[in-house]
Every structure is written in structure tokens, then in C-alpha cells.
Amino acid sequence: RIERGAVNINEEVEIVGIRPTSKTVVTGIEMFNKQLDRGQAGDNAGLLIRGVKKEDVERGQVLAKPGSITPHTEFEAEVYILSKEEGGRHTPFFKGYKPQFYIRTTDVTGEVVLPEGTEMVMPGDTVKLKITLIAPVAMEEGMKFAIREGGRTVGAGVCTKILK
């Protein structure tokens, strides 16, 4: 899905996130089995890219205009932890908690650092966390994400500050 902006055939793009950033060129744009010269925000389009094998890309990576978005592993976020009644956790979590962070289309494990003076986070709490991901993800301030545990959503958050 094209999140924002537009893309044209023969335009240079970067593959960002999970693995080291690489550059390629868009050689084709397809939507609903029709060949297009251009794709724009909101389109669910398939992009053909030059010299990239299927095994060189994975879910969670993004194609972007060079320099427009960068991969990050550390950020601060405002997070709401779902209550038991909302289908969330039944118990609090403590420092060192390592859930999955669902960002766009990828699940990445991350470790949370609780705010100074906070020993635990209860279901139903809203809290500011520092998160360190095990793999870099293309993200920016204002991006929303879900916190998942064993396939179920236990929290929702928004990135408030990129740290690294």
C-alpha cells in the first residue's frame, strides 16, 4: 500500500528497515492487474523493482523516496495497556518485559524501560515507555503501533520521540 506521496516508473527508491538500507529502481507499477505509470497515496499497488530477489526483501520493510524515512531501534512512546475486560493482559508487567511490537506490517521483539520510579505497569494504564527493538524498523514520530503477546493485542501506542 502506498502510504503517502507518489511513485513513478524509473524512480529511485530505498528499501528501508530490518536489513541495511539499499537502493533500487521501480521498473513497473501494477494495480488490479493493470500496468500503471504512477502510483499514489492510498493505492494498493504492486511495484516491480530492479535487481532485487524475493529473498532479499521481507515483510515490514518499506520502499521510500531516498532519505525520506530512516530505520530506528530506540524510541519513546505513549502507550495504553489494554485491561483484562478489553482482551488485554490479566497481570501487570515489570522492567525487562519483551513483547512483540506490531509496526505497519511487521512484528519485532522489543524491550521496554519503565519510567523512573515506576515498578510495574497495570492493565488499563497509560504510560510513557522507552522501547528498544531487536531489529531496525522504518518509523517516525507520530507513528502508531500495537503491542502483542502470543498473537493477541495487549496494548496500543504512538511513537513520541526517536532516540536511535
Image (cartoon, rainbow, N blue to C red):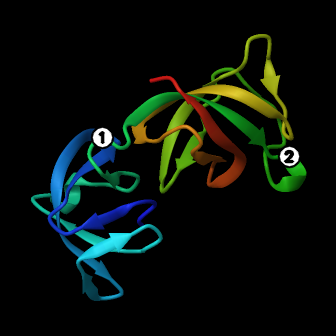
Q: Pick whichever, 73 or 162, lies toward us.
A: 162
Q: Residue furthest left?
A: 51
- Crowd tier of the residue under label 1, counting other residues whose Cα lies within 10 Å: few below 14, some 14–19, many 20 or above: few
The amino acid pointed to by label 2 is Ser
Helix, strand or loop at label 2? It is: loop
Q: Residue furthest top?
A: 117
Q: Earlier in the sequence, mark 1 or mark 2?
A: 1
- Crowd tier of the residue under label 2, counting other residues whose Cα lies within 10 Å: few below 14, some 14–19, many 20 or above: some
The amino acid pointed to by label 1 is Gly
Query: In which quadrant of the rendered image does the N terminus lie?
Result: bottom left
| x and y, in percent, of residue 40 in the image | 38, 70
| x and y, in percent, of residue 11 in the image | 19, 60
Q: Which residue lies at the image location 67% right of the left edge and 42% below the top edge?
A: 157
Residue 144 to residue 160: above or below: below
Q: Quadrant of residue 126?
A: top right
As drawn, is 152 to the left or to the right of 10? right
Residue 47 to residue 131: above or below: below
Q: Quadrant of residue 44?
A: bottom left
Pointer 2: what residue? 83
Identify the disc placed on residue 67: 1
